[in-house]
Image (tube, helix red, strand yellow):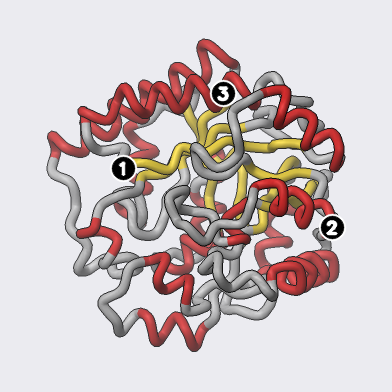
Amino acid sequence: MRNSITITTAPCCWGVDDVNNPHLPAWEKVLDEAKAAGFGGLELGPYGYLPLDLGQVSKALDKRALKIVAGTIFDDLVAPSNRDNLLRQTDEICALITQLPKPETHSGQRYAAPYLTVMDWGHDERDYAAGHSDRAPRLGEGAWQGMIDNIRAVATLARDKYGVRATIHPHAGGYIEFADELRRVVDDIPADLAGLCLDTGHMAYSDMDPVTTLRHYWDRVDYIHFKDIDTKVYAEVMKEHIRFFDACAKGVMCPIGRGSIDYQSVRALLTELGYGGYITIEQERDPRNMASILDDLAASREFLARAGF
């Protein structure tokens, strides 16, 4: 069954991942260009990028007819000492996104947007091993349980205080990246507490087949991200000792349809399983490489339209 899907975008398409990067574009520019590219919605982006002032953000979104489909926790989920910071971010993000105009709920959508996408980040030993399951260190039992406890605390606060569905996002360069870690986090976090946001690009980067993985975890998939991977650049960066976002700065993520991911098969799977709701296009890059953003987004949207999205 082919349910309605709305294609949205995220500030990472403009290179917005580290809010301390001095080269980031103004957040108003991102909203302007998201609107110009034809999107009706986007993610909030990393904590601290868009202001958390309800009046200011509401006015800016209304002016451009945009809606926020997800907030983001992109931080160290492992350290017990980071719990208060994670809960503060959760509180402030959810307080904002739940007071903004609500995105439409589609047939086939398991949980209403906006979501809270939860990603682990901030560990050099994993950042330099992104995509390399054989060399990436794994967390021991105690550290893993500490991360699970942090995720549970974030998801519980989002659900019980704000009615926001937390979606765990395996991310290249974090401690939830590879197939064994995805399987383990699904086992350790109950379905009524949090779902998954699976990302085609991060799955492929970490040697997981997107179609097979989406099918296997379908009963936990609440939200989806789309990316594509440049085959030549990927082969090159896999030979280097390189951070994930430095690989992105080299162009490892490309417009959708120009890379290695089989989106015809993804479309067939989503139709078969009746997915409805939101899919967010992402293409991480160096924020100094912004000249092609609108062309790249247009190319991705055009390809997806041809593929039946």
Q: Which of labels 2 and 3 is toward the front?
A: 2
Q: Residues within 10 Å of mark 3 (few under 14, many from 20)?
A: many
The residues bearing labels 2 and 3 have C-alpha atoms spaced at a distance of: 27 Å
Above or below — where is 2 with respect to 78?
A: below
Q: Quarter of the image containing the C terminus?
A: bottom right
Q: Who's the residue at 59% across and 19% down the image? A: 95
Disc 3 marks a residue whose amino acid type is: Cys
x and y, in percent, of residue 13 in the image: 62, 60
Between the C-alphas of marks 3 and 1, the distance is 27 Å
Residue shown at 51% from the left, 43% from the top? 46
For residue 159, the mark is none
What residue did someone put label 3 on? 94
Mark 1 Cα shell of 10 Å, populated few (<14), some (14-19), many (≥20): some
Image location (x, y in percent) of residue 203 = 47, 61
Residue 184 numbered mark, or none: 1
The amino acid marked with disc number 1 is Arg
User: Helix, strand, or loop for circle 1?
Assistant: helix
- 91 left or right of 32? left
**Picture coordinates of residue 127, whole percent (x, y):** 30, 61
Residue, disc 2: 36
Q: Is residue 17 above or below residue 168?
A: below
- In the rendered structure, the answer to whether residue 111 lies left or right of residue 205 reads right
Q: Secondary structure at mark 3?
A: helix
